[in-house]
């Protein structure tokens, strides 16, 4: 099946279609109307929320003046960054103006200073760069959203700690800059998924010590037992986030889910033999951070009575 395409009314009419044909295609569900005068030649289920938002952004930018720059959550989509839990019903664009921001049914127009080095081009669309995008999200969205997006941007090389620090310095006077600074200071590109980033936020807000990320654990004979999501050295606890699509490739490979479970259990047994307690959790556990923190503290009490052997090596920040 061909990838869904954005088609303007003008293009459809030039290809010999009529307005009544466009209406029938939308009523039948074969096509969908993105905004006035713009359609996607695919049914609703063919697009993810991020995919539909991308089509909306492309349609909006096509209809707006050249000084409009896709920003905020729209820039996240264009950069291929996660938009976990962010509303995607409206496209976000920024214009380099002092005033004039407004909210419409399908558009949020921001007025803010934009310098040339904060704008890039993606598939012909002017969009805020990775560092500027993360800065905008960090000062306008919640702490957890900012961490999810920022960790991913660091991991993918779309920004660096230095670049984000520069944006904080040049925009110290902007609204939300203190909020942004708190989130940016917390970012860590070693987080490998949305779930791992959310887990870090849960630990932080529950008062747990910051864990080491992606540390490798060895036996006394220098055999690597595995690389772990979270290692709480002072607590003697190892944590593993189990996302449905985020299982460790070194454990899953071509194995079936049941075989993966056996392999994971075997590794957990090896870690416990070294004196570590292992706690695993899933997406649903992240909805109750306090309960997750209690599980980790309970595991720490058990680990305190064990004799730990072997050693671990940290993974440095990129």
Image (cartoon, grey):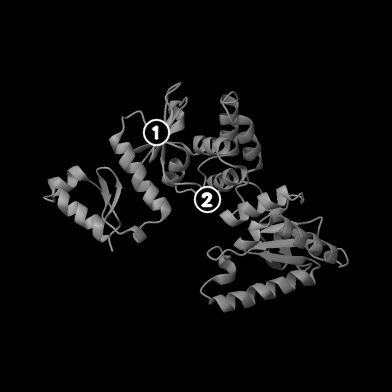
Task: Count neighbours of disc 1 (C-alpha within 10 A) and say few if under 14, some if 14 to 19, many if 20 or more.
Answer: many
Residue 231 x/y as whole percent: 73, 58
Whether residue 193 appears in this view of the structure is no
**The N terminus sits in image quarter:** bottom left
**Kind of element beneath mark 1:** strand
Q: Residue furthest top?
A: 98
Q: In terms of image quadrants, where is residue 288? A: bottom right
Residue 86 x/y as whole percent: 51, 47
Q: Which residue is mark 1?
A: 69
Task: Count neighbours of disc 2 (C-alpha within 10 A) and say few if under 14, some if 14 to 19, many if 20 or more.
Answer: few
Q: Is residue 5 left or right of residue 99?
A: left
Q: Is residue 87 left or right of residue 316?
A: left
Whether residue 118 appears in this view of the structure is yes
Looking at the picture, tell me which residue is in the foreground, 191 or 105: 105
Q: Is residue 285 left or right of residue 90?
A: right
**Kind of element beneath mark 2:** loop
Looking at the picture, tell me which residue is in the foreground, 23 or 238: 23
Q: Residue furthest left?
A: 16
Of labels 2 and 1, the one closer to you? 2
Residue 293 x/y as whole percent: 74, 57
Residue 266 x/y as whole percent: 68, 75
Marks 2 and 1, how far apart at CA: 23 Å
Q: Which residue is mark 2?
A: 85
Q: Residue at x 81, y 63 (%)?
A: 298
Residue 249 vs 318, above or below: the answer is below
Q: Residue at x 21, y 52 (%)?
A: 23
Looking at the picture, tell me which residue is in the foreground, 263 or 70: 70
Looking at the picture, tell me which residue is in the foreground, 119 or 23: 23
Q: In terms of image quadrants, where is residue 313? A: bottom right
Q: Earlier in the sequence, mark 2 or mark 1?
A: 1
| Cβ atoms at labels 2 and 1 below 8 Å apart | no
């Amino acid at each position: 099946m061909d990838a869904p395409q954005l088609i303007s009314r003008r293009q459809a009419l030039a290809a010999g279609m009529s307005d009544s044909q466009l209406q029938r295609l939308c009523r039948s569900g074969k096509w969908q109307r993105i905004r006035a005068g713009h359609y996607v030649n695919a049914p609703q289920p063919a697009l993810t929320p991020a995919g539909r938002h991308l089509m909306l952004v492309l349609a909006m930018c096509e209809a707006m003046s050249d000084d409009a720059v896709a920003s905020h959550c729209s820039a996240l989509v264009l950069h291929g960054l996660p938009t976990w839990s962010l509303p995607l019903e409206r496209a976000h664009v920024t214009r380099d103006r002092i005033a004039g921001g407004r909210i419409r049914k399908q558009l949020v127009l921001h007025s803010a200073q934009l310098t040339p080095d904060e704008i890039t081009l993606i598939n012909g669309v002017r969009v805020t760069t990775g560092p500027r995008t993360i800065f905008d999200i960090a000062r306008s969205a919640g702490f957890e959203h900012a961490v999810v997006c920022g960790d991913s941007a660091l991991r993918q090389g779309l920004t660096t700690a230095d670049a984000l620090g520069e944006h904080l310095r040049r925009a110290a006077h902007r609204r939300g800059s203190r909020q942004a600074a708190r989130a940016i200071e917390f970012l860590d590109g070693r987080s490998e998924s949305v779930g791992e980033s959310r887990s870090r936020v849960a630990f932080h807000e529950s008062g747990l010590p910051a864990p080491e990320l992606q540390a490798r654990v060895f036996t006394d004979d220098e055999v690597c037992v595995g690389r772990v999501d979270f290692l709480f050295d002072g607590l003697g606890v190892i944590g593993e986030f189990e996302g449905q699509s985020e299982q460790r490739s070194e454990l899953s490979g071509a194995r079936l889910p049941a075989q993966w479970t056996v392999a994971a259990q075997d590794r957990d047994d090896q870690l416990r033999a070294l004196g570590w307690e292992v706690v695993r959790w899933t997406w649903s556990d992240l909805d109750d951070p306090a309960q997750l923190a209690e599980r980790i503290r309970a595991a720490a009490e058990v680990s305190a009575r064990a004799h730990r052997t072997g050693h671990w090596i940290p993974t440095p920040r990129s």
